[in-house]
């Protein structure tokens, strides 16, 4: 590990200085000094190493930032109030007694227009599914949830357990809204539903409205995405097939894979793609997951 | 035998300074090598202009018992001229890289001098007699008409003013593709080696049209080059042993009895690098610029940019002694890289008894280390301290905090005044220090 602290010059300057020295050596009297140029090349290599490390770190940070900003921009285009009303309705209808108020308040808390400065990327949908991916399992692992939320903003310190009344059926639910397709997907017990609103269609009508608005946009995106293999957005039917076929074998670890993939953006996706495919028995589900990334795919194509 | 000063038994005094006083230094006058001969009576310097100047020590005279013999100019000659390699379109500098004396075998003196490509054997001889009374020549040298000669006479030798002649006796050329950095006369007094960046050749002093290549580290693909040879020296007593140092901070000892091509070393000396001190310039400062055997042949000394190390030939994994020359420069490596000072090649030398070592630094400072007492001293070669027999005051570099009186701060050091070449008399406490275009001679104070 090269200690750069003592050096007052950054790696880039050293690179340019070194290149200048090499260039000047060509016109020096007596011919090129092999020893000196060799030593200069070592400095060049060291500086390049440090520079590349810094660059990679910067690119990774920029990538994260771009993805986050992209999603945030999309969020801002949606009408938060509309979604809040839907959410309340859905809460009331779907979640039974006693839970509505809680859910509503929760929904309110989760709305982008609330006091939270930076809002999470993925939003409110139906009451059956929380707006954010609340990965509720036995352990109430907040870290994964917060990781998921943190793709756009700071994590919400929301305990999963609060939602247990909302998720009246199971604790192990994760809901994702694809900002491009506006397909709401719920992962329950590691089992990927196509859409929680498939069974509760009316709950999601409100949420679908924005989807209609953005249909055209998505069509545009689709054409871009087609250039990239594996990122073909999958149709719902296939999604269903995939989900139903693997109902019995999946555990919550797959959810965490999904969440972490979503959270870590493209680079995370690439690294975990194999695991993900294995988790879903190498089915189309990887493509599904990739397609669901929405903003991620745009970032990927742009890359 | 010799202390390094600072104690109560030894002090260095100014003796002489040779060279111009002008501030405006001509590049050609910059001294590039300094070497005493085996007896110490002769001191040779080479400069960037290709000239060799030899000083001879005057015999101690009874008239001036307090002053040791002074060194006066004995001979000056142009050893190398600038050349141009037309095939490669390269100019070959005339700068004298190294001078090495041969042991004296008769009245004449012989030395080897080398530039980047060619080694020359010079004979320096005296002429104090001249033949007079030639039959075919007039006194002024004009040829006589043979038909006009009526009688014959035997020429007689007449005394004349002493004339020192230097004549090239051998020219060893076309054996080095890369720049020669070292020459070293073998203890057999018949052979010598010459080293360039990638190869070492063994020559016989009498044969100029061929040499034996004994080390070749040139890789098959030059893009794989990772180190070069920086210095080489023959063992002072064992004519089959030599060492060469590399730019990676390693030293290889080779035995010519083992094989004709000594690519495989017999011993490999390397000190492991401290990973915590790794920086952009680690490779540069670890490159060895000089290697010298002790007179005893038991030890060798290496100089890298910041330190001097003494190695026991029987221990390869680390040096037995390490002396920091100017550690305060470690934090300045960036600046020194920008102004190219980090590439300066400092030499080092032993005293006659191997009890002390000396090397140069910046600001015309030079450092001496006593191996027995572990004391060290920093002295300065400057015209200000150039009164005859003036005692040299130890200098100190302030590395931080409040600067004391007579100390000099690191930022005030003049990096254009560098002492790269020093030499120690083989028997006495007389040292020669080359400071740019001036040669300083110091000796111990006569008690």
Image (spheres, rainbow, N blue to C red):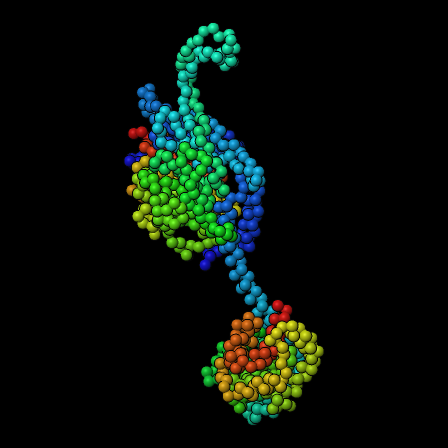
Seen in the picture, residue B149 relative to B335 is either above or below; the reply is above
Name which quarter of the figure residue A121 lies in.
bottom right
The quadrant of the picture occupied by the N terminus of chain B is top left
Which residue is painted at 50% across and 42% down in the image?
A: B177
Out of B314 and A23, give the one closest to the viewer.
B314
Q: Is residue A259 visible?
A: yes
Which residue is painted at 66% across and 78% down in the image?
A: A78
Out of A261 and B318, give the one closest to the viewer.
B318
Q: Is residue B251 visible?
A: no
Out of A55 and B14, give the one closest to the viewer.
A55
Residue B87 relative to residue A138: left or right:
right
Which residue is painted at 29% across and 29% down in the image?
A: B447
Residue B157 relative to residue B48: left or right:
left
Name which quarter of the figure residue B433 lies in.
top left
Out of A275 and B187, give the one closest to the viewer.
B187
Residue A107 relative to residue B412: left or right:
right
Q: Position of residue B41 (x, y in %)?
A: 36, 28
Q: Position of residue B5 (x, y in %)?
A: 33, 37
Q: Position of residue A299 (x, y in %)?
A: 62, 71
Q: Position of residue A203 (x, y in %)?
A: 63, 89
Seen in the picture, residue A188 relative to B231 is either above or below; the reply is below
Seen in the picture, residue B104 relative to B147 is either above or below; the reply is below
Which residue is painted at 42% across and 34% down in the image?
A: B207
Seen in the picture, residue A73 relative to A197 is either above or below; the reply is above
Name which quarter of the figure residue B203 lies in.
top left
């Amino acid at each position: 590990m090269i200690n750069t602290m003592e050096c007052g010059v950054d790696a880039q300057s050293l690179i340019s200085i070194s290149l200048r020295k090499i260039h000047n050596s060509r016109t020096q009297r007596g011919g090129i000094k092999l020893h000196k140029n060799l030593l200069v090349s070592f400095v060049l290599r060291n500086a390049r190493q440090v520079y590349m490390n810094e660059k990679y770190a910067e690119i990774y940070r920029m990538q994260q930032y771009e993805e986050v900003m992209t999603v945030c921009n999309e969020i801002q285009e949606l009408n938060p109030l509309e979604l809040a009303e839907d959410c309340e309705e859905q809460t009331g209808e779907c979640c039974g007694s006693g839970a509505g108020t809680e859910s509503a308040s929760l929904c309110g808390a989760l709305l982008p227009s609330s006091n939270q400065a930076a809002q999470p990327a993925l939003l409110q949908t139906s009451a059956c599914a929380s707006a954010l991916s609340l990965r509720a399992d036995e352990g109430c692992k907040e870290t994964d949830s917060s990781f998921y939320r943190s793709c756009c903003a700071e994590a919400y310190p929301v305990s999963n357990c609060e939602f247990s009344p909302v998720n009246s059926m199971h604790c192990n639910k994760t809901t994702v809204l694809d900002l491009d397709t506006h397909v709401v997907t719920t992962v329950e017990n590691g089992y990927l539903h196509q859409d929680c609103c498939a069974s509760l269609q009316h709950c999601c009508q409100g949420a679908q409205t924005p989807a209609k608005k953005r249909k055209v946009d998505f069509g545009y995106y689709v054409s871009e995405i087609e250039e990239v293999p594996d990122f073909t957005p999958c149709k719902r039917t296939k999604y269903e097939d995939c989900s139903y076929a693997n109902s019995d074998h999946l555990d919550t670890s797959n959810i965490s894979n999904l969440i972490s993939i979503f959270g870590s953006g493209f680079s995370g996706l690439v690294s975990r793609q194999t695991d993900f495919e294995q988790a879903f028995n190498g089915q189309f589900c990887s493509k599904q997951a990739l397609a669901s990334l929405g903003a991620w795919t745009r970032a990927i194509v742009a890359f | 035998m010799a202390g390094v000063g600072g104690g109560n038994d030894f002090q260095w005094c100014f003796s002489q300074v040779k060279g111009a006083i002008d501030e405006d230094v001509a590049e050609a006058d910059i001294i590039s090598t300094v070497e005493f001969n085996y007896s110490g009576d002769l001191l040779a310097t080479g400069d960037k202009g290709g000239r060799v100047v030899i000083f001879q020590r005057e015999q101690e005279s009874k008239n001036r018992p307090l002053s040791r013999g002074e060194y006066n100019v004995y001979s000056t000659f142009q050893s190398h001229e600038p050349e141009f390699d037309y095939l490669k379109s390269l100019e070959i500098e005339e700068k004298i890289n190294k001078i090495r004396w041969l042991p004296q075998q008769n009245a004449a003196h012989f030395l080897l001098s080398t530039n980047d490509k060619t080694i020359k054997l010079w004979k320096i001889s005296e002429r104090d007699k001249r033949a007079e009374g030639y039959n075919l020549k007039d006194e002024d040298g004009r040829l006589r008409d043979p038909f006009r000669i009526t009688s014959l006479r035997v020429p007689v030798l007449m005394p004349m003013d002493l004339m020192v002649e230097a004549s090239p006796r051998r020219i060893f050329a076309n054996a080095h593709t890369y720049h020669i950095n070292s020459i070293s006369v073998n203890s057999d007094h018949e052979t010598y080696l010459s080293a360039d960046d990638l190869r070492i050749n063994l020559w016989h002093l009498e044969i100029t049209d061929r040499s034996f290549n004994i080390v070749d580290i040139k890789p098959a693909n030059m893009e794989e080059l990772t180190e070069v040879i920086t210095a080489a020296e023959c063992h002072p007593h064992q004519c089959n042993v030599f060492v060469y140092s590399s730019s990676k901070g390693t030293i290889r000892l080779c035995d010519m009895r083992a094989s004709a091509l000594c690519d495989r070393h017999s011993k490999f000396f390397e000190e492991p690098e401290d990973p915590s001190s790794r920086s952009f310039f680690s490779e540069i400062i670890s490159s060895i610029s000089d290697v010298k055997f002790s007179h005893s042949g038991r030890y060798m000394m290496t100089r890298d940019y910041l330190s001097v190390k003494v190695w026991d030939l029987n221990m390869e994994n680390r040096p037995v002694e390490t002396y920091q020359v100017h550690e305060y420069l470690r934090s300045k490596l960036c600046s020194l890289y920008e102004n190219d000072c980090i590439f300066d090649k400092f030499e080092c030398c032993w005293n006659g008894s191997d009890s002390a070592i000396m090397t140069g630094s910046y600001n015309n400072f030079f450092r001496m280390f006593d191996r027995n007492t572990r004391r060290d001293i920093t002295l300065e070669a400057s015209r200000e301290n150039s009164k005859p027999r003036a005692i040299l005051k130890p200098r100190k570099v302030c590395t931080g905090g409040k600067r004391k009186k007579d100390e000099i701060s690191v930022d005030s050091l003049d990096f254009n005044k560098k002492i790269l070449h020093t030499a120690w008399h083989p028997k006495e406490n007389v040292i020669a220090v080359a400071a740019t275009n001036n040669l300083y001679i110091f000796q111990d104070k006569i008690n």
